[in-house]
């Protein structure tokens, strides 16, 4: 392989690792900690990267090193140490500094790629190492992703119960189990938990867990090495097949076709199939209709966006396992503010803990706000006062202009108060700022509105549920 190809393949692999990390940790944490990593060099025994400060090094080493190592190993197929060095003003070094890892040169696929998207990905597949055999695929289970560590609440109780059933039932209870929900809400956690549990209860069962991307990669490789027979057999001899993030299969006809056959063969033999995706079967883009309908035959369980109660429960359970004391106020603050998903919630907690440990200061509301400055802002940006006003106006069938008007009729004043209340809870705007957005009202008016709504909520279940519904719609 020519030097330049080697370099670009390492860079590509690193980019893919970063891409996966980004999906795992969320945008804010990615930007703060991972994006600044500069790949310096890589050989069989070690991959080296640089960060600009010691604090960052300690932080990345403490929080992400294991994942980086696991993903890197996953990517290059060689177990190598991860070394993070401090290089003030670290910039991407000139590319020739990179050395080759044990990557085999392979003949690229012949034939024209189906779409530009595939065109971009094929070289990466062609350069990937040939180590990941099927058995080792399940080796990448995260030991923390167990049922015991999964906090159950309203948004995920159905998915949880279904996953447990699948893991513990002797015979297939429903086929397939289709789990879907937004990013960072626990789909992968539940799938790994199923695998762990089956290993405990039925160690003789053969379980394969893999991402749809990996499935595609294996398939394309089998095509290239003309070894589709053993590809098929490997998959078709399992007791439980779990494929994560199946939305990535959309638009790739050949892989879809193969997946469909594998899927049908397993279901026909009464083997358990578990699928996850970010959308319901019928909403999967680029997936054939017969496949969509087939995917929905078993049990379709969706994981809803988190509620305050679930976020609180998760934070409390995670905080309990830490050596650092997290004041209840901080936990409530986080549950309130970090509404995007559970991954970000975890990331936030980890950052606070790392900061406290490194700086040697107790965790407080102040340090929390300081440390999570960027994350809090990013979470705020998700919903604006304008959006709240629009949604609330629609919901109560009043005009948006009534949010600013001075009309005091109950029919418009109440929705306006509700919108103020939601603005207070879903954004980080101050009371005076909120007042200004509601036709230049005084902050005491906003305060009064917030109090009023709280009062009504505690006295009227229906009203309270109405507000919860609005909140949930806005948080999405
Ligand atoms: P998804 O696959 O849906 O994007 P993950 O399963 O990767 O999300 O979950 C993201 C993170 O949140 C993981 O670290 C996971 O352990 C954690 N998590 C998700 N749901 C829960 C839960 N109900 N209880 C505890 N931790 C959870
Ligand atoms: Mg996942």
Image (cartoon, grey):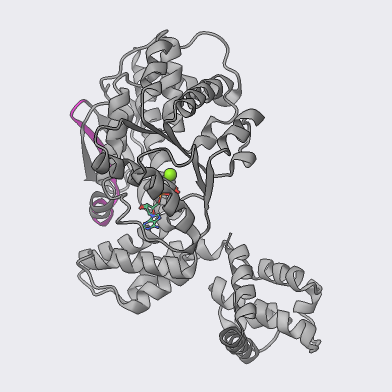
Q: Can you see residue 414? A: yes
User: Which residue is at 32% across, 44% downward?
Assistant: 90
User: Which residue is at 79% across, 86% downward?
Assistant: 406
274 w.r.t. 89: above or below: above
- Tell me the quarter of the picture where residue 452 sits: bottom right
Residue, far front: 171
The percent coordinates of residue 276 (x first, y second) are 48, 41
The magenta span reads 44-57
- Residue closest to the eye, 336 or 65: 336
Assess whether residue 325 is covered by the magenta stretch. Answer: no
Answer left or right for 202 relative to 179.
left
The percent coordinates of residue 363 (x first, y second) are 28, 73
The percent coordinates of residue 26 (x first, y second) are 44, 51
- Residue closest to the eye, 196 or 15: 196
Q: Can you see residue 340? A: no
Where is ligand 2, by quadrant? top left
Answer left or right for 110 relative to 64.
right
456 w.r.t. 374: above or below: below
User: Which residue is at 40% across, 22% downward?
Assistant: 236
The percent coordinates of residue 472 (x first, y second) are 58, 65
């Amino acid at each position: 392989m020519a030097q330049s190809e080697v370099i670009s393949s390492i860079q590509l692999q690193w980019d893919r690792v970063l891409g996966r990390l980004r999906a795992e940790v969320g945008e804010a944490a990615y930007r703060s900690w991972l994006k600044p990593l500069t790949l310096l060099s890589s050989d069989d025994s070690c991959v080296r990267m640089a960060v600009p400060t010691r604090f960052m090094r300690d932080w990345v080493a403490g929080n992400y090193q294991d994942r980086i190592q696991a993903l890197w190993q996953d990517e290059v197929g060689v177990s190598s140490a991860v070394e993070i060095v401090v290089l003030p003003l670290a910039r991407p070094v000139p590319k020739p500094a990179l050395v080759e890892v044990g990557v085999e040169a392979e003949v690229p696929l012949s034939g024209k790629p189906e779409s530009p998207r595939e065109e971009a990905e094929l070289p990466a597949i062609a350069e990937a190492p040939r180590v990941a055999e099927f058995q080792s695929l399940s080796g990448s289970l995260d030991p923390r992703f167990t049922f015991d560590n999964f906090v159950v609440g309203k948004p995920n109780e159905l998915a949880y119960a279904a996953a447990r059933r699948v893991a513990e039932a002797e015979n297939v209870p429903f086929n397939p189990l289709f789990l879907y929900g937004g990013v960072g809400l626990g789909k992968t956690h539940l799938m790994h938990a199923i695998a762990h549990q089956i290993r405990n209860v039925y160690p003789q069962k053969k379980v394969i867990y893999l991402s749809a991307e990996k499935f595609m990669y294996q398939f394309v490789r089998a095509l290239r090495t003309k070894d589709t027979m053993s590809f098929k057999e490997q998959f078709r001899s399992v007791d439980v097949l779990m494929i994560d993030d199946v939305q990535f299969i959309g638009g790739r006809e050949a892989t879809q076709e193969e997946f469909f056959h594998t899927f049908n063969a397993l279901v026909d033999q009464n083997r358990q199939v578990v699928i996850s995706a970010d959308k319901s079967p019928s909403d999967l883009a680029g997936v054939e209709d017969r496949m969509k309908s087939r995917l929905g035959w078993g049990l379709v369980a969706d994981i809803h966006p988190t509620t305050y109660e679930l976020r609180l429960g998760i934070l409390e359970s995670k905080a309990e396992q830490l050596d650092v004391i997290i004041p209840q106020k901080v936990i409530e603050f986080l549950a309130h503010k970090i509404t995007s998903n559970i991954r970000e919630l975890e990331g936030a907690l980890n950052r606070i803990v790392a900061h406290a440990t490194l700086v040697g200061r107790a965790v407080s509301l102040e340090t929390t706000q300081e440390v999570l400055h960027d994350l809090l802002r990013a979470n705020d940006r998700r919903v604006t006062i304008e959006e709240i006003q629009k949604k609330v106006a629609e919901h109560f069938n009043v005009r948006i202009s009534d949010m600013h008007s001075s009309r005091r009729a109950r029919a418009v004043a109440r929705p306006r108060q509700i919108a103020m209340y939601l603005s207070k809870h879903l954004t980080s705007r101050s009371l005076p700022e909120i007042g200004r957005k509601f036709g230049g009202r005084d902050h005491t008016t906003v305060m009064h509105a917030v109090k009023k709504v709280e009062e009504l909520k505690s006295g009227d279940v229906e009203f309270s549920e109405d507000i919860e519904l609005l909140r949930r719609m806005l948080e999405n």
